[in-house]
Image (tube, grey):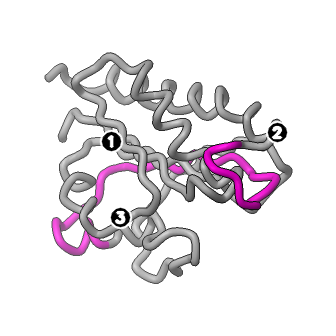
Amino acid sequence: MNDRVLVIGYGSPIRGDDAIGPLVADRLIDTIDSERVVVHSRHILTAELVGEVADAGLVIFLDASVEGVPGEVRCRPLVPDPGATMSMAHFLDPRELLAWVAALYGQAPPAYLITATAQTFDYAGYQLSPIADNAVQPMIDWTHRLIDQFISQSPAA
């Protein structure tokens, strides 16, 4: 099992709260001091990530959601789903990306999706609503918990 964690925050930086994924990833880049953790801040999920996802022991996706009460933070495990529908906001759904990994490499690493329910997707360059801004730290906390749990259970590099 690979002992590396891959964190990918994604979303549109010009669509209000949809920027929460990359903004949380940017903050994590500044707070994680481990060679075993790689953090990416992306606008969209693309097929170019397949190899990097396949090489990870754990993948954590960070994104805004339309489901739930605005500001609500959720963490759920993901499984590969070749039938996952593409949305207008992102090129690939994370489950579809995991399905590509499973199809090409025979298996996909464990993965989680941490989301914060958005209040607005109006145009705003990297500016979150106050409700979404309050969800940033809980998303960071969830990410750290998943990373710490994974690292504590895997052999050192």
Residue marked by disc 3: 98
Residue 150 - label: none
- Residue 133: percent from left, percent from top: 73, 35
On the rendered structure, is 124 left or right of 1? right
Residue depth check, mark 1 versus mark 2: number of the one nearer the observer:
2
Quadrant of the image occupied by residue 105: bottom left
Residue marked by disc 2: 131
Identify the element where label 3 is drawn.
helix
Identify the element where label 2 is drawn.
helix
Which residues fall within the magenta stretch? 100-127
- Residue 157: percent from left, percent from top: 14, 23
Q: CA distance from mark 1 to mark 2?
A: 27 Å
Residue marked by disc 1: 6
Q: Earlier in the sequence, mark 1 or mark 2?
A: 1
Assess disc 1: are there few (<14), some (14-19) or many (≥20) residues with their C-alpha within 10 Å of its C-alpha: many
For the point 43% across and 71% down, the residue is 92
* In front of the other: 38 or 56: 38
